[in-house]
Amino acid sequence: MSTIIQTPTPNLERSIEFYSKLDFDLVEQGNSVFAVDSQSIIEINTDRFARAGMKLYKPSWQGDVEALQEFTTVLKTENGYLLADPGNTWVYLIEGEAPMVQKGHTPCLLGNYAGFSLEMVDMGKGASIWNALGFKTTSGGPEQGWVALQNEEGTTISLMRPNSCPHLFFNPSLTYFNGKEGNPKVIQALRDHDIPLTEEITHFNKEGLVDNVIVRDPGGFGFFVFND
Protein backbone atom coordinates (compact mmCIF):
# COMPACT_ATOMS: atom_id res chain seq x y z
CA MET A 1 0.00 0.00 0.00
CA SER A 2 1.20 3.49 -0.90
CA THR A 3 0.08 6.75 0.71
CA ILE A 4 -0.15 10.22 -0.81
CA ILE A 5 -1.52 13.34 0.88
CA GLN A 6 -4.01 15.30 -1.22
CA THR A 7 -4.65 19.02 -1.01
CA PRO A 8 -7.05 20.90 -3.27
CA THR A 9 -6.26 24.34 -4.63
CA PRO A 10 -8.25 27.31 -5.87
CA ASN A 11 -5.17 28.54 -7.75
CA LEU A 12 -2.31 26.28 -8.77
CA GLU A 13 0.24 29.10 -9.03
CA ARG A 14 -0.52 30.24 -5.48
CA SER A 15 -0.15 26.70 -4.17
CA ILE A 16 3.13 26.20 -6.00
CA GLU A 17 4.42 29.48 -4.55
CA PHE A 18 3.33 28.42 -1.03
CA TYR A 19 5.08 25.05 -1.15
CA SER A 20 8.15 26.49 -2.85
CA LYS A 21 8.57 29.00 -0.02
CA LEU A 22 8.43 26.06 2.42
CA ASP A 23 11.34 24.42 0.55
CA PHE A 24 9.31 21.58 -0.91
CA ASP A 25 10.47 20.33 -4.30
CA LEU A 26 7.78 20.59 -6.98
CA VAL A 27 7.44 17.61 -9.30
CA GLU A 28 5.16 17.56 -12.35
CA GLN A 29 3.80 14.25 -13.55
CA GLY A 30 1.16 14.28 -16.23
CA ASN A 31 -1.57 16.72 -15.17
CA SER A 32 -0.55 16.56 -11.52
CA VAL A 33 1.88 18.58 -9.41
CA PHE A 34 3.42 17.09 -6.27
CA ALA A 35 5.14 18.91 -3.40
CA VAL A 36 7.76 16.57 -1.95
CA ASP A 37 10.37 16.64 0.77
CA SER A 38 12.21 13.86 2.60
CA GLN A 39 9.17 13.13 4.77
CA SER A 40 6.02 13.33 2.65
CA ILE A 41 4.44 13.51 -0.79
CA ILE A 42 1.60 16.00 -1.26
CA GLU A 43 -0.45 16.05 -4.45
CA ILE A 44 -1.78 19.50 -5.34
CA ASN A 45 -5.07 18.70 -7.06
CA THR A 46 -6.74 21.32 -9.27
CA ASP A 47 -9.91 19.24 -9.78
CA ARG A 48 -12.85 21.27 -8.49
CA PHE A 49 -14.26 18.13 -6.82
CA ALA A 50 -11.01 17.38 -4.97
CA ARG A 51 -11.03 17.53 -1.17
CA ALA A 52 -8.29 17.53 1.45
CA GLY A 53 -7.47 14.03 2.56
CA MET A 54 -5.46 10.92 1.87
CA LYS A 55 -5.03 8.66 -1.16
CA LEU A 56 -4.24 5.00 -0.50
CA TYR A 57 -3.11 2.83 -3.41
CA LYS A 58 -3.13 -0.95 -3.86
CA PRO A 59 -4.28 -3.42 -6.57
CA SER A 60 -7.68 -4.19 -5.02
CA TRP A 61 -9.76 -2.80 -2.16
CA GLN A 62 -12.77 -5.07 -2.57
CA GLY A 63 -12.18 -7.15 0.57
CA ASP A 64 -11.40 -4.07 2.66
CA VAL A 65 -14.55 -2.34 1.47
CA GLU A 66 -16.71 -5.14 2.85
CA ALA A 67 -15.20 -4.58 6.30
CA LEU A 68 -15.39 -0.78 6.03
CA GLN A 69 -19.10 -0.86 5.20
CA GLU A 70 -19.79 -2.03 8.76
CA PHE A 71 -18.69 1.43 9.99
CA THR A 72 -19.29 3.94 7.21
CA THR A 73 -20.67 4.55 3.73
CA VAL A 74 -18.27 3.63 0.94
CA LEU A 75 -18.88 5.03 -2.53
CA LYS A 76 -17.65 3.47 -5.77
CA THR A 77 -15.58 5.77 -7.94
CA GLU A 78 -14.06 5.51 -11.41
CA ASN A 79 -10.75 4.19 -10.08
CA GLY A 80 -11.65 2.73 -6.69
CA TYR A 81 -13.67 3.91 -3.71
CA LEU A 82 -14.28 6.95 -1.52
CA LEU A 83 -15.16 7.24 2.15
CA ALA A 84 -14.89 9.70 5.02
CA ASP A 85 -14.13 9.21 8.71
CA PRO A 86 -16.25 10.84 11.48
CA GLY A 87 -14.08 13.97 11.24
CA ASN A 88 -14.97 14.23 7.53
CA THR A 89 -11.45 13.48 6.33
CA TRP A 90 -11.86 12.07 2.85
CA VAL A 91 -10.03 8.84 2.06
CA TYR A 92 -9.57 7.82 -1.57
CA LEU A 93 -8.97 4.10 -2.10
CA ILE A 94 -7.27 3.90 -5.49
CA GLU A 95 -6.96 0.55 -7.25
CA GLY A 96 -3.72 0.55 -9.17
CA GLU A 97 -0.15 1.78 -8.97
CA ALA A 98 0.71 4.98 -7.13
CA PRO A 99 2.36 7.79 -9.12
CA MET A 100 6.09 7.23 -9.56
CA VAL A 101 7.06 10.15 -7.35
CA GLN A 102 9.91 9.82 -4.87
CA LYS A 103 10.43 11.71 -1.64
CA GLY A 104 13.11 14.38 -1.65
CA HIS A 105 16.43 14.47 0.17
CA THR A 106 15.81 17.18 2.77
CA PRO A 107 12.95 18.16 5.09
CA CYS A 108 10.88 21.26 4.43
CA LEU A 109 10.94 24.39 6.61
CA LEU A 110 8.14 23.03 8.81
CA GLY A 111 10.54 20.67 10.57
CA ASN A 112 9.98 17.14 11.85
CA TYR A 113 6.91 15.53 10.32
CA ALA A 114 4.67 13.66 12.78
CA GLY A 115 1.77 12.65 10.54
CA PHE A 116 -1.94 13.44 10.33
CA SER A 117 -3.89 15.00 13.19
CA LEU A 118 -7.65 14.48 13.11
CA GLU A 119 -10.33 15.72 15.49
CA MET A 120 -13.60 13.78 15.73
CA VAL A 121 -16.63 13.28 17.94
CA ASP A 122 -16.97 9.50 17.54
CA MET A 123 -13.42 8.32 18.21
CA GLY A 124 -14.43 4.69 18.54
CA LYS A 125 -15.88 4.62 15.04
CA GLY A 126 -12.94 6.65 13.74
CA ALA A 127 -10.41 4.19 15.15
CA SER A 128 -12.39 1.26 13.72
CA ILE A 129 -12.40 2.82 10.25
CA TRP A 130 -8.66 3.49 10.28
CA ASN A 131 -7.99 0.00 11.67
CA ALA A 132 -9.99 -1.45 8.75
CA LEU A 133 -7.82 0.63 6.40
CA GLY A 134 -4.69 -1.10 7.68
CA PHE A 135 -3.66 1.33 10.42
CA LYS A 136 -2.77 -0.42 13.65
CA THR A 137 -3.28 1.29 17.00
CA THR A 138 0.13 1.98 18.55
CA SER A 139 -0.89 3.89 21.68
CA GLY A 140 -3.83 5.49 23.43
CA GLY A 141 -7.46 4.56 22.97
CA PRO A 142 -10.88 6.18 22.43
CA GLU A 143 -11.54 6.11 26.17
CA GLN A 144 -8.35 8.13 26.72
CA GLY A 145 -9.33 10.80 24.23
CA TRP A 146 -6.35 10.21 21.97
CA VAL A 147 -5.37 7.40 19.62
CA ALA A 148 -2.16 6.99 17.60
CA LEU A 149 -2.18 4.68 14.58
CA GLN A 150 0.33 3.67 11.92
CA ASN A 151 0.21 1.64 8.70
CA GLU A 152 2.85 -0.67 7.24
CA GLU A 153 4.32 2.18 5.19
CA GLY A 154 4.92 4.24 8.34
CA THR A 155 2.17 6.82 7.84
CA THR A 156 1.05 8.02 11.28
CA ILE A 157 -2.36 9.31 12.34
CA SER A 158 -3.39 10.87 15.65
CA LEU A 159 -7.07 11.08 16.60
CA MET A 160 -8.20 13.64 19.19
CA ARG A 161 -11.54 14.02 20.93
CA PRO A 162 -13.32 17.41 20.85
CA ASN A 163 -12.18 20.15 23.21
CA SER A 164 -8.69 18.69 23.55
CA CYS A 165 -6.92 21.44 21.61
CA PRO A 166 -7.25 25.11 22.70
CA HIS A 167 -6.58 26.49 19.22
CA LEU A 168 -7.98 26.37 15.71
CA PHE A 169 -8.28 22.90 14.24
CA PHE A 170 -8.69 21.98 10.59
CA ASN A 171 -9.51 18.42 9.53
CA PRO A 172 -7.22 17.09 8.24
CA SER A 173 -3.98 18.74 9.34
CA LEU A 174 -0.36 17.64 9.28
CA THR A 175 1.65 17.97 12.47
CA TYR A 176 5.32 18.87 12.88
CA PHE A 177 7.07 18.56 16.26
CA ASN A 178 10.34 20.46 16.67
CA GLY A 179 10.98 20.60 20.42
CA LYS A 180 11.03 23.61 22.71
CA GLU A 181 14.44 24.72 21.45
CA GLY A 182 13.86 24.06 17.77
CA ASN A 183 10.34 25.33 17.19
CA PRO A 184 11.08 29.07 17.72
CA LYS A 185 13.73 28.77 15.00
CA VAL A 186 11.23 27.13 12.66
CA ILE A 187 8.67 29.85 13.39
CA GLN A 188 11.25 32.54 12.64
CA ALA A 189 12.14 30.79 9.37
CA LEU A 190 8.46 30.83 8.39
CA ARG A 191 8.33 34.56 9.09
CA ASP A 192 11.53 35.12 7.11
CA HIS A 193 10.01 33.32 4.12
CA ASP A 194 6.78 35.36 4.31
CA ILE A 195 4.58 32.36 5.16
CA PRO A 196 1.28 33.68 6.58
CA LEU A 197 0.60 32.34 10.09
CA THR A 198 -3.05 31.40 10.49
CA GLU A 199 -2.74 31.34 14.29
CA GLU A 200 0.04 32.31 16.68
CA ILE A 201 -0.45 30.25 19.85
CA THR A 202 0.60 31.47 23.30
CA HIS A 203 -1.71 29.24 25.38
CA PHE A 204 1.02 26.80 26.41
CA ASN A 205 3.64 29.42 27.24
CA LYS A 206 3.72 30.88 30.78
CA GLU A 207 5.34 34.07 29.48
CA GLY A 208 2.77 34.56 26.74
CA LEU A 209 5.26 33.96 23.94
CA VAL A 210 4.34 32.52 20.56
CA ASP A 211 5.88 29.05 20.65
CA ASN A 212 3.41 27.17 18.40
CA VAL A 213 1.81 28.23 15.13
CA ILE A 214 -0.71 27.00 12.59
CA VAL A 215 -0.32 27.47 8.84
CA ARG A 216 -2.80 26.74 6.03
CA ASP A 217 -2.11 26.28 2.35
CA PRO A 218 -4.26 28.00 -0.32
CA GLY A 219 -6.61 24.98 -0.41
CA GLY A 220 -7.18 25.08 3.34
CA PHE A 221 -5.00 22.14 4.40
CA GLY A 222 -3.69 22.77 7.93
CA PHE A 223 -0.15 22.46 9.29
CA PHE A 224 0.46 22.38 13.05
CA VAL A 225 4.00 23.56 13.81
CA PHE A 226 4.35 22.68 17.48
CA ASN A 227 7.14 22.28 19.99
CA ASP A 228 5.97 18.90 21.34
Image (tube, rainbow, N blue to C red):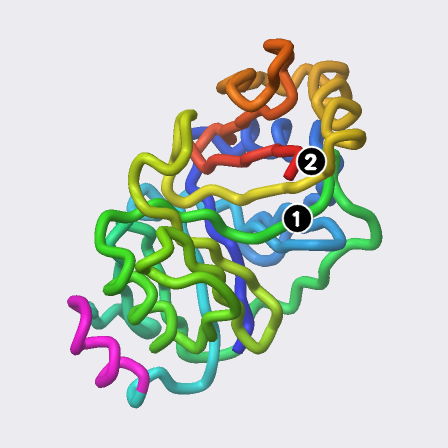
Spot the residue most to the right: 105
Q: Is residue 81 above or below residue 112?
A: below
Name the residue tied to disc 2.
110
Please tell me which residue lies in front, 69 or 16: 69
Q: Amino acid at mark 1?
A: Tyr
At 59% from the left and 10% from the top, the residue drawn is 208
Name the residue tied to disc 1.
113
Boundaries of the magenta span: 64-73
At 50% from the left and 51% from the top, the residue drawn is 116
Q: Amino acid at mark 2?
A: Leu
Q: Give the image location of residue 224, x and y in percent.
A: 55, 35
- Number of marks in the rendered image: 2
Q: Is residue 23 left or right of residue 35?
A: right
Q: Is residue 35 above or below residue 221?
A: below
What's the mark number on residue 51? none
Image-quadrant location for residue 91: bottom left
Please tell me which residue lies in front, 99 or 149: 149
Numbered disc 1: secondary structure: strand
**Residue 65 located within the stretch drawn in magenta:** yes
Numbered disc 2: secondary structure: loop
Q: Give the image location of residue 121, x and y in percent.
A: 23, 48
